[in-house]
Image (tube, helix red, strand yellow):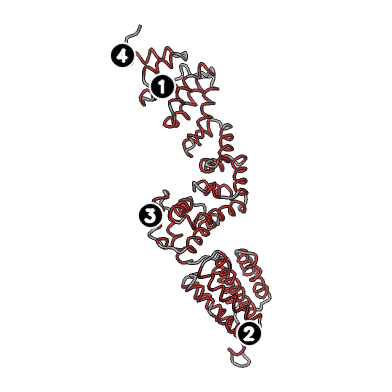
Amino acid sequence: MTDSLADIDALALKCRAERSRDYIAESIQCYRAGAYRSSIVHTWIAVVFDLVDKIRELALANDPIAVRINTQYETYITQINHGNDQGVKNALEFERTILSTCRKELNFFNHQQFTDLERLREDRHQCAHPSFQRAGVPHRPSAELARLHLRNAVEHVLSQPPIQGRPAIAEIIVTIASEYFPKDRHQAATALRQTPLANPSDALVRGLVDELVFKYAETGSPLYGKIQVGTALSSLLDTHRGVAESRIAQKLSTLVRRVDDNGLPAVARLIAAVPEAVTLIDEAARLRLSEFVRVGPDVDVLPAMVGLGRHPQIDEIVRRRILGFGIELLAVAIQEYGMAELAKERVFGLISESRSYHSTNDVFLRLVTPLFSHLTRDDIERVIRMPTETDADLIGANRFEHFIEQVSRAEIIPEAELDTLLGSNRMDYLVRERQRERGVPQA
C-alpha cells in the first residue's frame, strides 16, 4: 500500500494548476482512508470542475466554441441562483454530457481517453446512487479500480492544458519530435502542411504553441530539449503569425521566468533558435537571459550566444563577454557555434597583442584560418598594419605568410596594392619573395 500511496502523491504533483490539485486532494484522502467509493465520486467531481475551468479558459481566449459552451453553462448557473428548477435540470444534463461535449466539440480526448473517462463516470454512478444496486448489496470498488480512475483523471484531464484538438496536436508532435524533422524553417513549413496544420483553427495553433514550449522543458517528453521545437515555432510565425506571435511571446516568457537554473541553458538555446523570440519575450524574461549570458558557465552560454545576441540589449553583453575569451574558447565559438562575426574583434585583439612567433602561429592557425571567409578588405589591411601600429610579432611567422597567400589567391586586394601595403609595414622581405614567385624583375 505504501508504494501505491507514493505513486498517487506523485500523480497529484503532475496536476497543471494548484486548483486542480485541490480538486483531486479529497479523492486522494479518501483513497488513503480506504474509502474507495468516496474516492471515485470525488475523482469524477474533480474531472468535471477541471473541464469547466478549461472551457472557461478557452472562452477567455475567445475560442468561439468554448465561448458558446461557457455561455450556456453560465445561463444554467444563473437560472439556479434565481430558483429556476429548469436550471438544475439543465446543469445536470450539462454534467452528464460534458465528456462527449469536450470530445466532439473541443476535441480534448482521443478514443481511449474518452473510454477511460466514461468508465469513471459510470463507476461514479454505481458508487453514488444506491438505487443502482440490489437492496442490501452496496457497490464495493477495489483499491485498484479507485487508483486506476485517479491515474486516468490526472493523466487525461488534470495535468493537461486547455487545448482544443488534442489528438490533432498529438499527431503534429510526433512529426516534430522525429530526428528527421527539417531544421530549416521553410522546409519545416512544408512538412507541417501534411499534418492537421494544413487548415487549423486558431485554438489548434494556440494549443500547439503551448505543447511545444512546455513539452520542450518537460523531462520524459518526446520533445524534451529538441532544437527542432525552435524550427517549428519559427515556422508557425511564418504561416500563422497573427495567432502564434502573441502566444509564443507569452509562453516563452513564462518558461524563461519559471524554469530553474539547471533548465535555463536548454531554454536559452530554444530562444536562440527562434530568430524573433528574444525580441518577443517580455522584459523580465530578457533580463534573466541577459544575466545568464553575462555570468553563466561557458559551456552553457556558448550555444545560445549568437541567437540571444540578436537583441541590442543582449548583443552588448555578448560582445563584452567574448572580449574575455582565450584562444581555446574562441576556437570553439567560431568553429562549432558560428560566432565568426561576433568573435572578430577579440581575434584582432589577440593578433595585436602577440609578441612571439609561437603565439602568432597559434592564433592564425586556430582562429584566423576558420575566420578567413568572414574577413573584409578593411579587416585584412588592419591585420597587415599591426606590426607597425601595435608592434605585433607577425613578421616571419609561417602562418601569417600563409594568410597573405590566402589573401592573394582570393584576390581580395590587387597584387600591386598588397605589395605596397606589406612594404609600408616592415615586410619588404615578403614583397621580394612574392615578386620572385610572380616573376617580377628585382631592382
Q: Are marks 4 and 1 in contact (CB under 8 Å)?
A: no
Amino acid at the residue labelled 4: Gly
Judged from the image, the secondary structure of the residue bearing numbered disc 4 is loop
* Residue under label 4: 439
Judged from the image, the secondary structure of the residue bearing numbered disc 1 is helix
The disc label shown at residue 84, or none? 2
Quadrant position of the C terminus in the picture? top left
Q: Is residue 114 above or below residue 291?
A: below
Density class for disc 4 (Cα within 10 Å; few <14, some 14-19, many ≥20) is few
Choose mark 2 or mark 1, whichever is in front.
2
Q: Could you tell me how far apart the alpha carbons at marks 3 and 4 are, in whole angstroms?
A: 56 Å
Quadrant position of the N terminus in the picture? bottom right
Amino acid at the residue labelled 3: Thr
Density class for disc 1 (Cα within 10 Å; few <14, some 14-19, many ≥20) is some
Q: Is residue 328 above or below residue 95?
A: above
* Residue under label 3: 190
> Which callout, 1 or 3, points at the residue further toward the start of the chain?
3
> Which callout, 3 or 2, points at the residue further toward the start of the chain?
2
Judged from the image, the secondary structure of the residue bearing numbered disc 3 is helix
Q: Could you tell me how far apart the alpha carbons at marks 1 and 3 are, in whole angstroms?
A: 45 Å
Q: Is residue 350 above or below residue 12?
A: above
Amino acid at the residue labelled 2: Asn
Between 379 and 81, the residue placed more toward the observer is 81
Q: Is residue 194 above or below residue 436?
A: below
* Residue under label 1: 404
What residue sits 51% from the left and 59% below the top? 211
Choose mark 3 or mark 4, whichever is in front.
3
Density class for disc 3 (Cα within 10 Å; few <14, some 14-19, many ≥20) is few
> Which callout, 4 or 1, points at the residue further toward the start of the chain?
1
Judged from the image, the secondary structure of the residue bearing numbered disc 2 is loop
Q: Could you tell me how far apart the alpha carbons at marks 3 and 2 are, in whole angstroms?
A: 55 Å
Amino acid at the residue labelled 1: Ile
